Amino acid sequence: MNPTAPNHSASGQVTFLGAGPGDPGLLTLRAVEALASADVLIADPQVLDVVRVHARAQVDTPLQASADEASIPVGVPALRDTANLVMAAARAGKRVVRAVTGDPGLDGYVAEEMLACAAEGIVFEVVPGIAAAVGVPAYAGVPLRDAQGTDVRFIDARSADARCWSEVGASDATAVVSTTLDSVAAAAGELVSGGRKPDTPLTVTVAGTTTRQRTWTATLGSVAQVLKAAKVLPSPDGGQPVIAVVGERSAAAQRDRLSWFESKPLFGWRVLVPRTKEQAASLSDQLVSYGAVPHEVPTIAVEPPRTPQQMERAVKGLVTGRYEWIAFTSVNAVKAVREKFEEYGLDARAFAGIKVAAVGEQTAKALVAFGVKPDLVPSGEQSAAGLLEDWPPYDPVFDPIDRVFLPRADIATETLVAGLIELGWEVDDVTAYRTVRASPPPAETREAIKGGGFDAVLFTSSSTVRNLVGIAGKPHNVTVIACIGPATAKTAEEHGLRVDVMSPEPSVHKLAEALADFGAARRDTALEAGDPVTRPSERRPGSRRRARS
């Protein structure tokens, strides 16, 4: 049915959307677009968090159906609760997104919901998603076909009958079996009974496409022993879904070279980032690219200055032409000036004729969001020193005004002020905001910090060390400590922490890169020694060696 066709009823529209097997990055552009315009979001619990971030803040996300049974038209079969909820929302004229794990075309219940929409003339569309049976092997490094080609058969172990097992067992097709962890051995036995050789290669992947993914390589005859030896079974989590790939041509024997996802340097590491979510956005994205799971914990809170008069005078001077330049050294400084502008009924037009500098990319982005394009951003290091490298000296011939407005934190260093004065500028160094210690994180986070639940922590300043220890306690000695520079490392050591990684440059992105190098070296050492690759949080206390990148 064409979703753009005119809807002649009073009903809404339904988008049946495939959310993929778990990795949020596998959502299609069309899926993100549909989620952004949804009034109601009805999602499988497994993918609710994946899709909800792309929906509007006011989207309705009911978890259970509440449709009135009497409102279902005569002749329409009784459906599951989620189907009734979809129909009720559509009848109310809402734009409904029904998000399912994998691809909606492989979900029999969704087909039932589509038929119900068709029966009532409700407009609907289907946005395909990546099926788990295809996406998970790709993330496990297991191609389903080789250059010679072979048949690929997909089997759902829950519904497969004896004929299915015997047909696939008697063939040389690659079999992709959707099953559960505690049923893998039974599925392998069915294939052997159907004719497959017990030494046929097999891979088993759990939590595919997520940072919890784990893959084991075995054969049809040995899979039970392999999972038992890995202490995966028996387990209370044995009912979790897995994808098993069976076949001589499925490249299971080449996983050591093709396992691109699980071999990322920080794969599965829980990394504590002591910054706010806004400050940590690009850093967290970088950590995710290394396979890590970042966890942001603010260690400082921002409050207005105790005496606002200085800031008020500076903003008025900005409007009356007192300054040639204004320099922003943080996102918080942009926020403080913007709030003061709004208080006075001003907007970005007040910056007309004034040169604007930003200390780095994140600050520049905050300015652009305000409607201001910075004239100067460091071409090299994103810091006060990097800004000074590119800052022009005062020239009385070309610069009609010699004064710079510098709104910043109450605890900022004097590096930038001294450097600007040396270049011939007069500086109005104004406290735009105060930084105070943040409130303690939730108890669960505090316990994870002190109990070794985090694999690494990134310290980006001495104050983050002091504040994190003050609000949450000292990180456990198995946690890898990474510091942005010598001063931060010294503060960490003064608090009894052993520094493992130090950034070669005072940059948060170089710090993350250094941690990734540390993780890669640690992984290589384990593989060369024939040891299993583990995360720091999986090691026993006292077993780690000191190292520094």
Image: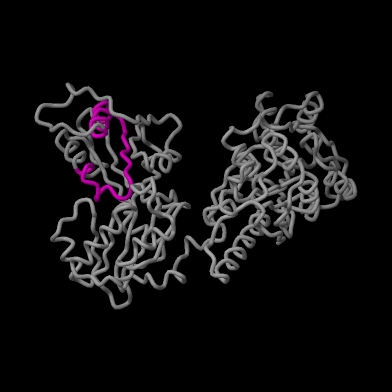
The x and y percentages for residue 292 are: 55, 52
Q: Which residues are magenta?
A: 82-111
Residue at coordinates 19% horizontally, 33% vertically from top-left?
Answer: 79
Is residue 90 part of the magenta span, yes or no?
A: yes
Q: In which quadrant of the rendered view does residue 174 lie? A: bottom left
Q: In the displayed structure, does residue 254 sit left or right of residue 311?
A: left
Q: Quadrant of the C terminus?
A: bottom right
Report the residue that reaches farthest toward the bottom.
148
Is residue 149 part of the magenta span, yes or no?
A: no
Q: In which quadrant of the rendered view does residue 67 lie? A: top left
Q: In which quadrant of the rendered view does residue 409 lie? A: top right
The x and y percentages for residue 186 are: 26, 57
**Who is closer to the viewer here, 32 or 427?**
32
Query: How many numbered discs, if any?
Result: 0
Q: In the displayed structure, does residue 472 sit left or right of residue 194?
A: right
Q: In the displayed structure, does residue 113 sit left or right of residue 223?
A: left
Q: In the displayed structure, does residue 355 sit left or right of residue 50?
A: right
**Who is closer to the viewer here, 32 or 267?**
267
The x and y percentages for residue 196 are: 23, 70
The x and y percentages for residue 188 are: 27, 62
**Who is closer to the viewer here, 514 or 29?**
514
